[in-house]
Image: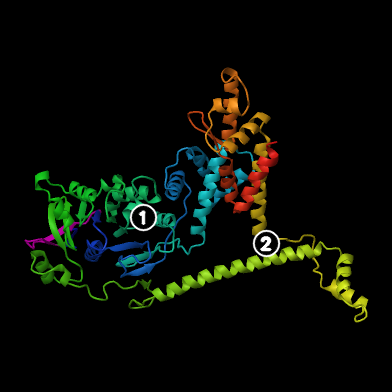
């Protein structure tokens, strides 16, 4: 690095050396064809700074030569963070839930505490209508997100080594990956200097259409990071799906080959030249591997990016067109598996191919979980059989055994003593029929069933009739149709219509019917049952039983 600049490569045709200012930048182009990874690798090597690379998917051709470090995460529970986290999981923006989420986050210390508050509110059984729906959704989101963080081997200290630091996030879900990247970016921004953050798949972590925990911290990083010599290098196949707010702060664009017409136009839009001087569409579509259009403060140039392992002579020859880029091969040891973070006292890195070991560990882990499940199922069946055996009267048990044994071949007292000795005895006042976790699940399931039945029981006779009618019709029904064909009333206007409208609104708030803006009433009982019971792993048969029970007995 010289005067805060990094050598990029050589200008195509003239072979003049091209360097860029050390700044936030983005590299775009079709994966496998453009050479984005090689470009980022070269820039990192020549910058002389530490870099963090996130490997987010299995088989990803990313920077793999470096030191593997433990994923870092610091728990947060502020409203903006939790909101962005849930929106990333739901792939949609929160609207109705905002106020409830603000109250739940206020004064909380962790995601677990927020989950506890949601659970307690639902357990009280006082929530109804929309409020119940919101808490149920939040509970579902947090139940799926929190275990990914709790049971992962995450570090609370971010330790970086010279050169490339690789954070392997392959085993995490997309939401958990976002949490880790957000934590790392925030920690680097607040506590470190001279670090480059590489965010591949930018469309995934900086999405245009919905929120993500990474978006706010990346915006702050781009605005403030350069003060401490911290920079973000973005890598994206295209720009259409990437949020434009952080992109507006990026000053260096390295634009590679594109094939899709809209992406070609997006690429041309980023080239800061008058329209007449911009490249043609076919020039973008025919860029060779390693060839990019550089658009920066210093102007626009077509550049061949020199890989860090390629000598100047060959790079110049490729830029001049005297050597085909396809004829130059990377050394076989260019992309090697990550080394483990060096232990104290070691003078060099030890590199080995651990892909087979990782695969075997995953298979062993799955096998262990399957065995645990088999053991739990066996314990459940055994507990049920023991409990059933304890309920049998001793005299009845002895009588049945004696019926099977010829009395002239064995002593009666001996067989009675033997049978009774084998009846399980309970040491203590309480016997667990099922495993504690299973019992808790069943308790929640039973409580939820009772809540649904209580809601149905609270309906008046007219509402019950309307509910049965709408379920039988299995389609949307307007109020005139309900009044005349269900309630058999001749007057369909005035106070009658007002009363029926209010009754349908109450049922909508309970979630057992759905009413749209045109006052059409739709069946929603099955969806409510599936939503509430499904959270507690109720089978389809159990859900159907509750539904049939309501129709057959509770709506009479």
For residue 15: magenta?
yes
Image coords of residue 172 (percent x, y): 44, 61
Residue depicted at x 67% and y 59%: 436
Image coords of residue 457 (percent x, y): 68, 36
Is the C terminus in the top left, top right, bottom left or bottom right quadrant?
A: top right
For residue 179: magenta?
no
On residue 185, which mark appears?
Answer: 1
Graded by Cα atoms within 10 Å as few (under 14), some (14 to 19) or many (20 or more), the crowding at tag 1 reads many
Residue depicted at x 71% and y 67%: 382
Front-most of residues 470 and 294? 470
Q: Quadrant of residue 286?
A: bottom left
Q: Nearer the viewer, mark 2 or mark 1?
A: 2
The relative height of residue 113 versus residue 53 in the rendered view (above or below) is above
Front-most of residues 457 and 319? 457
Q: Residue reaching furthest bottom?
A: 409
Could you tell whether 131 is left or right of 220 in the image?
A: right
Distance (Cα) linking label 2 and label 1 = 42 Å
On residue 483, which mark appears?
Answer: none
Could you tell whether 185 is left or right of 287 in the image?
A: right
Q: Quadrant of residue 456?
A: top right
Q: Secondary structure at mark 2?
A: loop
The relative height of residue 319 versus residue 526 in the rendered view (above or below) is below
**Residue under circle 2?**
435
Could you tell whether 206 is left or right of 268 in the image?
A: right
Q: Residue reaching furthest left?
A: 14
First in sequence: mark 2 vs mark 1: 1
Q: How is the image coloured?
A: rainbow
Span highlighted in magenta in the image: 9-24
Graded by Cα atoms within 10 Å as few (under 14), some (14 to 19) or many (20 or more), the crowding at tag 2 reads few
Residue depicted at x 27% and y 63%: 49
Image coords of residue 51 (percent x, y): 30, 62
């Amino acid at each position: 690095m010289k005067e805060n600049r990094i050598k990029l490569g050589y200008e195509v045709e003239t072979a003049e050396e091209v360097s860029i200012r050390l700044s936030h930048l983005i590299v775009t182009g079709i994966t496998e064809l453009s050479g984005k990874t090689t470009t980022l690798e070269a820039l990192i090597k020549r910058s002389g700074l530490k870099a963090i690379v996130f490997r987010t998917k299995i088989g990803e051709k990313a920077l793999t030569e470096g030191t593997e470090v433990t994923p870092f995460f610091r728990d947060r529970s502020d409203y903006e963070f939790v909101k962005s986290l849930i929106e990333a999981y739901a792939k949609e923006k929160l609207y109705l839930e905002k106020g409830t989420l603000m109250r739940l986050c206020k004064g909380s210390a962790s995601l677990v505490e927020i989950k506890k508050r949601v659970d307690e509110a639902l357990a009280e059984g006082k929530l109804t209508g929309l409020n119940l729906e919101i808490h149920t959704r939040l509970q579902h989101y947090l139940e799926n997100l929190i275990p990914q963080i709790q049971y992962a081997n995450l570090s609370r200290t971010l330790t970086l080594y010279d050169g490339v630091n690789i954070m392997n996030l392959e085993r995490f879900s997309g939401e958990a990956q976002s949490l880790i990247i957000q934590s790392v970016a925030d920690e680097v921004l607040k506590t470190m200097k001279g670090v480059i953050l590489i965010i591949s798949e930018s469309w995934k972590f900086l999405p245009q259409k919905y929120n993500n925990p990474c978006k706010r911290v990346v915006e702050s990083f781009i605005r403030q990071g350069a003060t401490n010599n911290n920079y973000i290098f973005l890598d994206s196949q295209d720009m259409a799906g990437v949020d434009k707010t952080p992109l507006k702060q990026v000053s260096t664009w390295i634009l590679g080959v594109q094939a899709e017409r809209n992406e070609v136009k997006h690429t041309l839009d980023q080239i800061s030249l008058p329209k007449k001087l911009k490249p043609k569409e076919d020039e973008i579509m025919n860029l060779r591997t390693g060839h990019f259009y550089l658009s920066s403060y210093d102007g626009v140039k077509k550049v061949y990016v020199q890989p860090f392992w390629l000598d100047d002579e060959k790079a110049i020859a490729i830029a001049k067109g005297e050597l085909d880029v396809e004829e130059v091969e990377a050394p076989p040891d260019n992309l090697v598996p990550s080394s483990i973070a060096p232990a104290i006292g070691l003078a060099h890195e030890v590199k080995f191919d651990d892909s087979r070991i990782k695969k075997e560990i995953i298979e062993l882990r799955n096998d262990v979980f399957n065995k645990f499940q088999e053991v739990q199922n066996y314990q459940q069946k055994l507990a049920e059989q023991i409990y059933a055996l304890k309920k049998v009267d001793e005299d009845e048990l002895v009588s049945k055994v004696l019926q099977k044994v010829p009395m002239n071949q064995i002593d009666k007292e001996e067989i009675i003593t033997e049978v009774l000795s084998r009846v399980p005895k309970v040491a203590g006042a309480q016997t667990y029929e099922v495993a504690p976790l299973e019992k808790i699940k069943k308790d929640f399931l039973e409580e939820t069933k009772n809540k649904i039945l209580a809601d149905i029981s609270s309906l008046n006779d007219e509402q019950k009739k309307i509910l049965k009618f709408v379920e039988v019709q299995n389609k949307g029904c307007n109020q005139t149709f309900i009044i005349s064909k269900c309630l058999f009333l001749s007057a369909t206007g005035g106070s009658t219509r007002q009363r029926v409208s209010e009754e349908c609104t109450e049922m909508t708030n309970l979630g057992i019917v759905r009413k749209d803006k045109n006052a059409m009433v739709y069946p929603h009982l099955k969806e409510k049952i599936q939503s509430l019971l499904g959270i507690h792993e109720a089978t389809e048969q159990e859900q159907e039983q509750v539904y049939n029970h309501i129709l057959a007995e509770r709506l009479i």
